[in-house]
Amino acid sequence: MGAVIIGTGSCLPKRVLTNHDLEKIVETNDEWIKSRTGISTRRISGEGEETYHLASSAARKAMEMAEVTADAIDLIIVATMTPHMVMPSTACFVQNEIGANNAFAWDLNAACSGFLYSIDTAAKHVLVDRDKTVLVIGAETLSSRTNWKDRNTCILFGDGAGAAVLRYQDNDRGLIGSKLYSDGSLWKLLYLHSSPSCNPEIEQVDNPGPHMLMAGQEVFKHAVKAMEKAVNELLEKENVSIDDISLMIPHQANIRILKKLMSRLGINQEKVFINVHKYGNTSAASIPIALDEANREGKLKAGDLLLFCSFGGGFTWGAALLKW
Ligand code: COA
């Protein structure tokens, strides 16, 4: 152990889009959305709230809490599937924006599991290079890749960013372990094409455009089973019981997925941090936003065992255990 989170931050766009606002855009209603997803509102980015802006703002707050200056950051990882550009990476935009001139920076795309993959990677960096400081960010502007005519998907997603600063400490705190998985064979159940290629020889004929496409019920079933299995395997590996967990901070996709997961794992809702009703599914940003809210609301005490789990396009999924 020793890869410790020493600061957290988050940033949400100003504009709130309610279920009633969505009633004016597609054929839906507040009651349907709430009962099927648990979502009431989500945040939508406007001018000056691009992915790297949200990411940089979340990063500044995490650095302030960690009492770390920009020039002390050695590595920036931005988990995103909605980068500002394909090149340069959003992490390079963040580096420039916050003035982290000594850092190297890259993006990591593991869809909604991006933050867990990034924390695992960051922890390995600080355990090998013990004087390094790593900034991990999950940031998305999913509203820019949502088909606003598709009621199956446009009700689910929102924008935002969350960040964490990691550093080595010689104690028993930090990331205990993680179990991360991918299954590329199921990609067609949840995907998002990039823009069409300019080279006609490699242009994909089945490209429906740069929008999220999803087989909702299939994704739902896989998400519950996969997260349950990952959590149980991790708990067994680390010799920890579900009753030992102080707080579970899951990816916030849908309240029904979370309720099924809680019931299968045998964990009480009081021990699960939920904010999906406010922000919808913010993909890679959802866990770090929730972590920062829990932290700032005083819900985390030194020595607490935190359990994270996620599921997303790819498919990608996993779980992580951390001593706060
Ligand atoms: N408003 C009103 N009706 C809607 C609707 C909306 N926004 N979206 C779909 N419907 C309709 C469907 O057209 C269908 O109508 P029909 O019975 O006349 O054909 C009916 O509601 C039921 O649709 P269905 O897709 O079976 O609903 P569901 O209970 O599976 O809920 C999801 C749909 C998307 C909310 C649910 O499948 C889900 O949450 N899946 C997981 C999504 C997710 O979390 N993805 C990201 C993972 S990281």
Image (cartoon, rainbow, N blue to C red):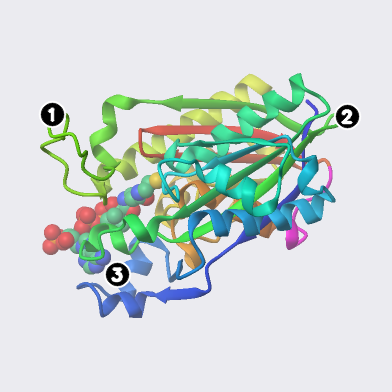
Alpha-carbon span between mark 3 and mark 2: 48 Å
The yes-or-no answer for disc 1 within 8 Å of ligand 1 is: no
Alpha-carbon span between mark 1 and mark 2: 56 Å
Q: Quadrant of residue 18?
A: bottom left
Circle 2 residue: 171
Per the image, label 2 sits on a secondary structure element best described as loop
Circle 1 residue: 201
Numbered circle sitting on residue 128? none
The kind of residue on which mark 3 rests is Trp
Q: Residues within 10 Å of mark 1 (few under 14, many from 20)?
A: few
> Which comes sooner in the sequence, label 1 or label 2?
2
Marks 3 and 2 in Cβ contact (< 8 Å): no
The kind of residue on which mark 2 rests is Asn
Against 205, is 60 above or below? below
Looking at this view, name the residue that lies furthest to the left. Answer: 205
Alpha-carbon span between mark 1 and mark 3: 44 Å
Tell me if I can see residue 209 in this picture: yes
Q: Is residue 74 left or right of residue 86?
A: right
The kind of residue on which mark 1 rests is Glu
Q: Residue at x 60, y 46 (%)?
A: 137
* Residue 299 inside the magenta-drawn segment: yes
In x, y percent, where is residue 192?
A: 29, 44
In x, y percent, where is residue 124?
A: 68, 23
